Image: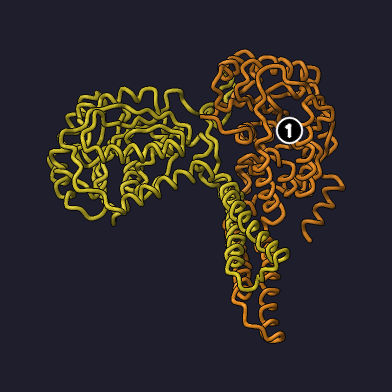
Amino acid sequence: MRRLQLSVVIPVGKRVDDIESLHHDYRRGLDRCGVTYEMIYVLDGDRDEGRQLAALRARGEPIEIIKLGKSFGEATALMVGFANAHGARLMTLPAYFQVDSNELPKLVAAAADADLVVAHRWPRRGSRFEALRRSAFHGLLRLITRQSFHDLGCGVRLMRRRVAKEITIYGDQHRLLPVLAAQQGFIVREVEVAQSPQDEFRGHYRLREYVHRLLDLFTVFFLTRFTKKPLRFFGMIGSATFAAGALFVAILIVQRMVFGIPLADRPALLLSCLLLVLGVQLFALGLLGELIIFTHAKDLKEYKVADVIEAPGRRSERKGGLAPEADAAARVPDYPGYPKATSG
Amino acid sequence: MSGVRSSDDTRIDAGAATAKRRQDVELSIIVPLYNEEANVRPLWDAIRSALAPTGIAYEVLLVDDGSSDATLAAAAALPAVHPEVRVVKLRRNYGQTAAMAAGIEHARGRVLVTMDGDLQNDPLDIPRFLATMEQGYDIVVGWRHDRKDKFWTRKLPSRIANALIGKVTGVPIRDNGCSLKAYRADVIKKIPLYSEMHRFIPAMASLAGPRLAEIKVRHHARRYGTSKYGLSRVYRVLLDLLAVKTIIGFASRPAGWFALLAFPALLISAASLGASFYRLLALEQPFSTTIAGLGVLFGALAFFLTMIGMIGELVYKTGDSREDRLSMLTAQRVTAGSDAAVADEDRDET
């Protein structure tokens, strides 16, 4: 049996356009790609679109519908979709018009020599303010991760199975998928695609959205830089705080000893000792983090082996049974870092 | 290893298979390479000529740590001609420790030797490492007693660092920075290696209580390429050292470690509270909110640290190191079989 080449996962969450016209639009675009594909709609919680989709399915459309028990967020919906996909490659599409579906073949073409392809809507419509907000977010991200992306908000991505298997995202971390993939050493490419004429930003972001994006940035910062060395992160902040506190205390003691300023009724003493205490607490948290890393080091392997090159005929037993034409999915368990089945 | 926890029949089979496979390769030499294109070929030639007279069955694992130059191409050309060479390609640059860990994971030998890819270590020393291992040691570390480096920027900081590491970890080694080390595979494969822990492998290994020897090795100045070390990592080494101390000293009883940290805070707290009440009651001065506040603050710190220790216990209980350590000790009992091993056994059970 020929293996399915592409699985398309469409998470249906808060923002949804008319699902029927969207589906037909995607079908047109996907048919042009020249690959065999399946479409998986993941309903994030109880949604009305379920009925429309069921009707589409009844009419013979090649779709699968997965319903989550409650709303878990787009990233979780994607992960569930990936887990149920059969294709060699996985594509994510938003449940609303974002890109011109005629552009989908571009992604498939670009995926030949990349592990993950993300769409970058360009040229882009929208107000100055939106453009500014976007570039601020991506600029900050570049500063933190030294990775350059332009449109992480775009839900159109195409990846190898391996990418989805090795990266765990949840909640609304779907935007960070390319960042985390690049961090894992996957080859990530951005492809410029035309924006859909129906892609319109309605309403405005509330303050909560900004806070969430900031927290996203912080998550990335921690995940990409310090997961393996918590003491460096906490230790750095902790020692800075501790040093500041110690300096204050020293100044106060000098003032007491040399200038005779009584110490007992100075709130400044309390403040400086608070800094000392905070410093020690941060350090302690860092040590705790180190303990976690040490005791769980087996599950948290930090490196990924891309390939083992050895003389033919001397292949190791771990790869021995693998036929050369075996697909990427079957290879995954051979790579360290992928959670292995525990024995016993 | 996979058969250890399964049923008896399969264990015997797996054990026999493992023993058979092990006979193929006695020694694995692991060399992390990062942008060493000019060194790959000379390195392989040096290893080959050093090991040819010994007649030992060996393999060389060249670990390409995401090099941006032609290192991978140079290394990948070797296996087709010389089947002893295997190349492990990492997906990107992860650093020396990760590269070593990858090599250790893929190694098949009974004894593993790690060395630098920049020709500063001399493969001619390897047979001496093997001879020392034969005497029953689990880890043999090299000591570059005659280093060809600048004194002020390289040798002096390294000497201070080694003294400090030895003092703090209780594993006195004169040269932790020397990459040329030999390990019994059973021991090293169970030690978690991450971050920049390669410097602390002997200290980490002391968790398992293996026998450790130190021998002098030759050291050459760098011939090709540039050095990737600098002074800038002092603070990182210090923090890592503290982490290692926490792990090797207290991983199995974190509550004790944090209680130890909490003790000074508790003392300060008691002193401040005592002083403020003494002022109030004995000297009949007005009550000092500041000093009493200090007492409460440090008391809270001591409490906080104790609680962190509790979480630490929880972490340790749910982690995998406990089981690992036990299996490591078991492996040692089986392999060593000398008087020293018996003594170890007695100690473990008390």
Judge by depth and name the residue closer to the eye, B220 or B97.
B220
Extreme-right residue of the structure: B339
Question: Which residue is found at the position 23% from the left and 48% from the top?
Answer: A204
Chain A palette colour:
yellow
Figure colour scheme: by chain
Residue where numbered disc 1 is placed = B111
Residue extending farthest front = A259
- Give me the chain letter of mark 1: B
**Secondary structure beneath disc 1?**
strand
Residue B190 visible at all? no
Q: Quadrant of the N terminus of chain A?
A: top left
How far across and down, in percent of the image, does residue A295 sit?
60, 51
Tell me the kind of residue under disc 1: Val
In the image: residue A99, left or right of residue A157: left
Give the side of residue B107 with respect to residue A42, left or right: right
Q: Quadrant of residue B153?
A: top right
Rendered view: B89 above or below A68: above
* Tint of chain B: orange
Q: Which residue is the extreme one toward the top?
A: B81
Between A196 and A103, the residue placed more toward the observer is: A196
Q: Position of residue A115 (x, y in %)?
A: 40, 29
Q: Is residue B280 visible?
A: yes
Q: Position of residue B343 (x, y in %)?
A: 84, 52
Left or right: B159 as drawn, with respect to B14 = right
Does A341 appear above or below B317?
above
Q: Nearer the viewer, residue A161 or A323?
A: A161
User: Residue A125, percent across and down?
Assistant: 21, 34
* Mark 1 burial class by Cα count in 10 Å: few <14, some 14-19, many 20+: many
Residue drawn at 59 percent across, 76 percent down: B289
Q: Is residue A164 left or right of residue A38?
A: right
Q: Is residue A246 above or below residue A266?
A: above
